[in-house]
Image (tube, grey):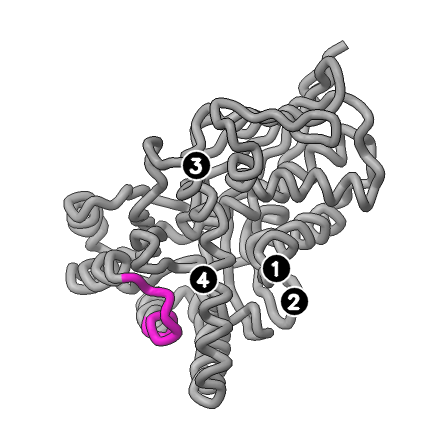
């Protein structure tokens, strides 16, 4: 009999505090109305068969497990598997921590979240995969346990990941993170514009795709190196970012969106100061501000010029939304409207 478990989770947008939160500073994040879905079902044989649809590794399929080392269409299993590093690490983690395995499992992943765009695709993959597999194997799967497991997987892949993304993927809505503690918040819904530059093209080779799949890890490591080189200067920047998050939270509670936008602009400047704003994203932010946006900033990990400037910008448009969307599209960005406060993890048995 076919047994199927479906888990879906939202994308995230960090409004304030990305990068700084890794070092204990406050961050404010929200779920947005794009989702990633994982369906786990039984299959003949042993091992894990992974199918990934409609994200930049279109059509990638592979069998993972001790008895099966096969991937297609790529011949190089090790490089191909890096492009789904989070899925593979989630499986390894659950095998080690909970002893799952010993049967054939099909894992199908589909997503509305652009890969390597600062919108939480890696955390979404971790949370949805962990949740679906834990339910499939009838393991205790309360929300906090899923979040903790998913965060452990993300840290194992990235080296040093904040808990922001996995918290949003799990809980949805809004969360504040401070010193690794997650606090869920009730805040007003925002209508935002997201402009994404440099999504991985289908023609990209597997080696480059693998590099992009771990983009966040590379950027976080480079920030760490700069911080160690300029410790005193970075302390002031990080303290300022912490205060910004506190002011932003109060502005949202008051419904003061003009102040919120001004704080977004300042946060963008701090991200630029620590070296995570590539030229292409910087141009989108500047253009949006000049066209009348209340605020605009890079969101998520940001990007690097030597990796094509991949990433996303978040815009609080005010009355200038139509002008900003057109200008971003002309600049070559993928442009979508987004609503904040999306629901978190949803799990259902469908077979």
Name the quarter where the C terminus is drawn.
Answer: top right
Q: Secondary structure at mark 3?
A: helix
Q: Position of residue 292 (x, y in %)?
A: 18, 61
Q: CA distance from mark 2 to mark 4?
A: 20 Å
Please tell me in which quadrant of the rendered image residue 113 appears.
Answer: top left
What residue did someone put label 2 on? Answer: 180
In this rendering, which labeled residue sits more in front, label 3 or label 1?
3
What residue did someone put label 3 on? Answer: 206
Q: Is residue 272 magenta?
A: yes
Q: Position of residue 115 (x, y in %)?
A: 43, 42
Q: Which badge, 1 or 4, is on the more N-terminal residue?
A: 1
Name the quarter where the N terminus is drawn.
Answer: top right
Q: Which badge, 2 or 1, is on the more N-terminal residue?
A: 1
Q: Secondary structure at mark 1?
A: loop
Residue 280 lies left or right of residue 257; in this view the side is left
Please tell me in which quadrant of the rendered image residue 267 appears.
Answer: bottom left
Residue 11 lies left or right of residue 194; in this view the side is right
Residue 98 visible in rendering: yes
Mark 4 and mark 1 in contact (Cβ < 8 Å)? Answer: no
Q: CA distance from mark 3 to mark 2?
A: 34 Å
């Amino acid at each position: 009999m076919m047994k199927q478990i479906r888990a879906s989770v939202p994308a995230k947008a960090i409004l304030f505090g990305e990068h700084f939160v890794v070092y204990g500073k406050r961050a404010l994040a929200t779920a947005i109305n794009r989702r990633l879905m994982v369906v786990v079902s039984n299959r003949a044989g042993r091992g894990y068969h992974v199918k990934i649809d409609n994200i930049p590794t279109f059509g990638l399929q592979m069998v993972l497990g001790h008895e099966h080392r096969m991937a297609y269409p790529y011949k190089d299993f090790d490089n191909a598997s890096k492009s789904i590093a989070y899925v593979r690490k989630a499986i390894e983690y659950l095998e080690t921590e909970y002893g799952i395995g010993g049967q054939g499992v099909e894992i199908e992943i589909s997503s509305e979240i652009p890969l390597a765009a600062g919108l939480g695709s890696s955390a979404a993959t971790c949370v949805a995969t962990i949740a679906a597999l834990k339910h499939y194997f009838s393991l205790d799967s309360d929300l906090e346990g899923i979040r903790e497991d998913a965060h452990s997987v993300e840290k194992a892949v990235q080296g040093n990941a904040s808990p922001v993304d996995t918290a949003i993927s799990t809980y949805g809505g809004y969360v504040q993170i401070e010193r690794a503690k997650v606090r869920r918040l009730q805040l007003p819904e925002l209508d935002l514009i997201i402009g994404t530059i440099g999504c991985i093209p289908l023609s990209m080779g597997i080696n480059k795709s693998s590099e992009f799949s771990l983009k966040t890890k590379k950027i976080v490591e480079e920030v760490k190196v700069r911080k160690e080189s300029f410790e005193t200067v970075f302390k002031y920047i990080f303290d300022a970012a912490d205060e910004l998050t506190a002011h932003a939270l109060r502005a949202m509670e008051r419904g003061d969106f003009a102040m919120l936008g001004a704080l977004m602009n300042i946060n963008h400047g701090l991200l630029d100061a620590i070296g995570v704003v590539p030229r292409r994203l910087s141009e989108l932010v500047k253009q949006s501000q000049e066209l009348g946006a209340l605020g605009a900033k890079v969101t998520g990990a940001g990007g690097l010029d030597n990796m094509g400037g991949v990433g996303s910008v978040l815009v609080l448009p005010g009355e200038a939304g139509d002008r900003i969307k057109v200008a971003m599209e002309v600049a070559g960005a993928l442009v979508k409207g987004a609503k904040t406060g999306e629901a978190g993890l949803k799990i259902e048995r469908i077979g």
